Image (cartoon, rainbow, N blue to C red):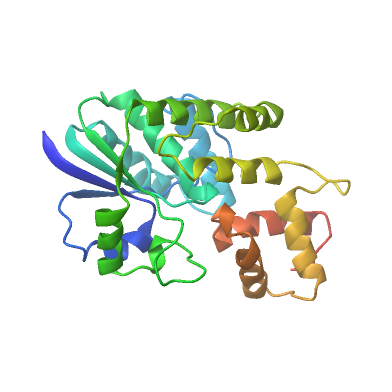
Amino acid sequence: MKDTLHILNGDATFNSFEQTGLKGDIMVWREVLSQGPVEENIASGSFWKNRSKWISKSFNDSPDTYQEKVINQLSTLSEPYKEINLWFEYDLHCQINMLGVIMMLRKNTDLSAPSVYLICPDSYPGIENFKGMGELDADQLKYLYENIRVQLGEPDFYVAAEAWKYYTADNIEALNQWLHENNYWANLHSLKKALQAHVKRSTTNHNGLNYIEQTLLDIYNSGIHDKPGIYNAFWQTENIYGMGDMEIDIYLGRLKEKDLIGI
């Protein structure tokens, strides 16, 4: 049995993590499960086939690249480790990816065997407008490991499974009702707020736009017509979504198709 596996939320974190001196294997989770098609059985072939198609189309990537960066890495989750550390942040992007990883571990691993830990910062001492672990250096990442790491147990896995079930069911009313009724989140302290943001973005207004589309249109109509400017304006108020520029471009593309913006 191997000792330790660190599952990181992205390559930006990986760049600094290598310098922390923390021992163990590293797996970078390069999916974006908060966007595109999902289904409850994450271990099914159809799940990853649909993901590959959507990622390749939405991000102008190739199935071969997806196979290399995502599919080929999944076997790591079924390998025997004594300890698994999940490095995911507070935003919707990270929280849904975190749920996906936990569900994969539940499918492939006896979770009573490895000790599973979560490092999930929503802030960092001395940093205003904390944007995520990708902006931290090695010493700062090590500080998180030593000070906010919590061990997950069966209550956490149960909450994660319930959240994943409701998220993948694509029933916003049922998800919203569960969020109102459920008062126990165990150590998954950022999950409720992230899922509330998902509910918010899934509501269509009288213009036929969801929350993110309307927010981007408002930014555009305020006079900001260049993409970098739009990205920055969006991130200033909507960092709960954890969206990168390529994800924002998906929504901008929808607005352009409706002839609402000219970029």
The C terminus, quarter of image: bottom right
Q: Residue furthest right?
A: 206
| Quarter occupied by residue 181 | top right
Q: Nearer the viewer, residue 125 or 1?
A: 125
Q: Is residue 247 left or right of residue 222?
A: left
Q: Position of residue 88 (x, y in %)?
A: 40, 49
The residue drawn where x is 46% and y is 29% is 159
Q: Nearer the viewer, residue 257 or 205?
A: 205
Q: How many marks?
A: 0
**Would residue 35 be visible to someone looking at this image?**
no
Q: Position of residue 95 (x, y in %)?
A: 48, 44
Residue sitting at the far front: 183
Q: Please give the name of the residue rendered at 82% of the width and 54% of the height, measured from the top-left corner.
A: 258
Residue 135, x across and y down, in percent: 40, 68
Q: Position of residue 257 (x, y in %)?
A: 78, 55
- Residue 68 vs 133, above or below: the answer is above
Q: Quadrant of the N terminus?
A: top left
Q: Residue at x 12, y 38 (%)?
A: 2
Using the image, determine if residue 169 lies above or below residue 199. above
Residue 182 falls left or right of residue 132: right
Q: Nearer the viewer, residue 253 or 222?
A: 222
Residue name at image x 57 percent, y 48 percent: 57
Is residue 236 left or right of 33 when viewed as pictured?
right
Judge from the rendering whether residue 143 lies leftward or rightward of residue 187; answer left or right.
Answer: left
Quarter assignment of residue 226: bottom right
Determine if residue 61 is in view: yes
